[in-house]
Image (tube, grey):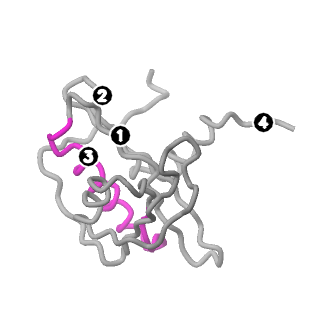
Amino acid sequence: CALTPPQDKFYAECAAAGSATQLAYVGAELAGAIACRLELLPDRSGALLYVMTVGVLAPHRDRAIGTRLLRHALNEGSRDPFLTHAYLHVQTNNADAIAFYKKFGFVEDGVARNYYKRLEPPDAAVLRLDLREWTPETIRGVTYERFDPMAQ
């Protein structure tokens, strides 16, 4: 029996989500990231795009990097006809984050009780967006480079 370290599972899930998972750089400096995974619906009729995390390093905040990362992930997800919705969890007391996601059209879809093990409050708001209704938008001021780990 082989055990997979949790970080290996995380990276494998990110890779399976394709280009919805992205790193953002300002020049050569890492500025932020979005990590997503795909979740097959129980009846296998489609899948969900789960946004695991969006983060922007403090020196790069208030420059729309998080907005661009999320918009990119939603654009990518909406292009896949097998994906029906995007969803994510936000700590219930994080009004700023909830408002941020609502600007994109996410709606509250319940509360996951005791979702967080080391945070107070431990509850998470579940936010959901119908990808079939998302209209992809051009993201200005962004260039894309493909990273090839085999070229290292």
Circle 3 residue: 66
Residue furthest left as drawn: 141
Q: What quarter of the picture does the N terminus occupy?
A: top right
Identify the disc placed on residue 33. Answer: 1
Identify the disc placed on residue 30. Answer: 2
**Residue kind at label 3, given as amino acid type:** Gly
Per the image, label 3 sits on a secondary structure element best described as: helix
* Rendered image quadrant of residue 89: bottom left
Residue furthest front as drawn: 120
Q: Nearer the viewer, mark 2 or mark 3?
A: 3
Q: Magenta residues?
A: 61-87
Q: Note whether 127 is above or below 67 in the view shown.
A: below
Q: What quarter of the picture does the C terminus occupy?
A: top left
Circle 4 residue: 3
Q: Is residue 94 left or right of residue 9?
A: left
Q: Nearer the viewer, mark 3 or mark 4?
A: 3
Q: Is residue 87 left or right of residue 3?
A: left
Q: Is residue 20 left or right of residue 70?
A: right
| Marked residue nearer the N-terminal end (3 or 4) | 4
